[in-house]
Amino acid sequence: MNAIRRGLGSGLVQTFLVVIGLVWLTPLAGLFLSSLRSAQDTARGGWWTALADPGRLSFDNYTALLKNAGITQAFWNTVLISVPATTLVVVIAALAGYAFAWLDFPLREPLFLLVVALLVVPVQIGLLPVAKLFGALGLFGTIPGVVLFHVAYGLPFAVFLLRNYFAEMPKEMLEAARMDGGSEWRIFTRLVLPVGRPAIASLAIFQFLWVWNDMLVALLFADSSAQPLTVQLQSQIRQFGSNIDVLAPGAFLSLIVPVVVFFAFQRHFVQGVMAGSVK
């Protein structure tokens, strides 16, 4: 760990990381500047030409975006899909991960092996049978149907990740808590969850980004009233072709939310990655 910290603290490495960060942020900056330009300015030159005349930039495109009922509804649909799908996966996976790691119950090992086996099942295999099932249950084309699909396919990896992380906790710590009279629920909520916060935060970031940026599942399972932002933007491209004044601010809105979420939880994410690297 100390060697890693000394390496990251060197000037050359820091300069390299800054350059990588700037390269990574360049498309985001370009998309933001494009979202502030008129369609005529965009047609005349690339986004970098806006730096020569920043006075022509305005938020008129965002004002028009807020008046686009399809885009705004799609944004809230994305929120209604991503937040429950992330929350349910994290909660269920934390409970299951603790059970697989520290509780004795029948068929624990075979059930965990089944969870591991489900990791190799591609999403595409389940599209048709799940669509038939949701159609029979009246969930096809609805937001709850999309949420359930994401939860079902996100759980195997989530359970596997948290189970392995929880299993690395010192056994003596849990035994001491049990000797003090702590119930399993109290040990889980007061001890395991705080210690496992880096792994849980990392899982929440991965799950949220996957669901927020998904288009395949939503394209197949959501009807026009439940479409998220990714599907709606794709529809706008198909319908209007080069309406960059709508697509650019919509794409930036779709992009900036995951970026904000990542930076908000980056401290926990880095802690989880570093913890996993030294165990």
Image (cartoon, rainbow, N blue to C red):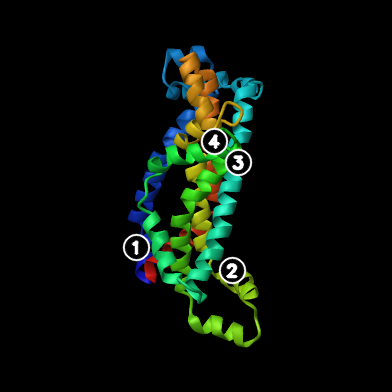
Tell me which amino acid carries mark 2: Pro
Marks 3 and 1, how far apart at CA: 47 Å
Q: Nearer the viewer, mark 3 or mark 2?
A: 3
Say if mark 3 contacts mark 4, CB within 8 Å: no
Q: Which residue is mark 2?
A: 194
Q: Which residue is mark 3?
A: 144
Q: Nearer the viewer, mark 3 or mark 1?
A: 3
Disc nearer the start of the sequence (2/1): 1
> For the residue carrying disc 2, how many other residues have a C-alpha within 10 Å: few (<14), some (14-19), or many (20+)?
few
**Spot occupied by residue 166 in the image (x, y as percentages of width and height):** 49, 70
Q: Which residue is mark 4?
A: 135
Q: Which residue is mark 1?
A: 7
Disc nearer the start of the sequence (3/2): 3
Disc nearer the start of the sequence (4/2): 4
Tell me which amino acid carries mark 3: Pro
Q: Residue at 33% across / 54% down in the picture? A: 12
Tell me which amino acid carries mark 1: Gly
Marks 4 and 2, how far apart at CA: 40 Å
Q: Residue at 63% across / 69% down in the picture? A: 189
Marks 4 and 1, how far apart at CA: 55 Å
